[in-house]
Amino acid sequence: MKYHNFFGLLALLVTVSIGTTQEFNPSLTVSKKLTNRELMEDFQLFKKGLEKLHPGLYKYKRKNSIDVAFKELEQELLDGASVEEVFLKLSRMTAYIQCGH
């Protein structure tokens, strides 16, 4: 059952990317640039979620290949990104895993 939490974690990641405020803020948009701290927090949550909860993370790609992809993604995020750009980058990473979900 814990693997079903993975998809909830991904949805949470998008929500967390918008900011850490307690209340919904409609002025925040997908074009909002995230701080490096926000980006790294989101990246670590995404990476840990995949490593701990994804049942087939290394089914189609070797661990060292996934590790390199994570490192490249982390470096891309250090350059700064908007919520929309983060979504696209994380989507590319999940496509790279090739699990079909």
Image: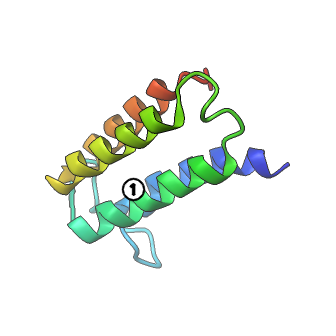
Q: Position of residue 100 (x, y in %)?
A: 61, 20
- Decide: is 37 above or below 57: below
Residue visible at 28% across and 48% down?
30
User: Dividing the picture into quarters, in which one does residue 59 lie?
Assistant: top right
Q: Helix or strand or loop: what does disc 1 sit on?
A: helix
Q: Position of residue 78 (x, y in %)?
A: 19, 56
- Amino acid bearing label 1: Phe
Left or right of residue 42: residue 59 = right
- Residue 59 visible to the viewer: yes
Protein image colouring: rainbow
Residue visible at 27% across and 71% down?
37
Residue where numbered disc 1 is placed: 43
Left or right of residue 13: residue 35 = left
Q: Position of residue 31 (x, y in %)?
A: 21, 48
Q: Quadrant of the C terminus?
A: top right
The total number of labels drawn is: 1
- Decide: is 95 above or below 33: above
Left or right of residue 83: residue 94 = right
Residue closest to the eye, 44 or 81: 44
Left or right of residue 2: residue 10 = left
Q: Position of residue 15 (x, y in %)?
A: 47, 58
* Most distant residue in the right direction: 1
Residue visible at 60% across and 32% down?
58
- Residue 26 visible to the viewer: no
- Decide: is 38 above or below 2: below
* Most distant residue in the left direction: 79
- Decide: is 44 above or below 31: below
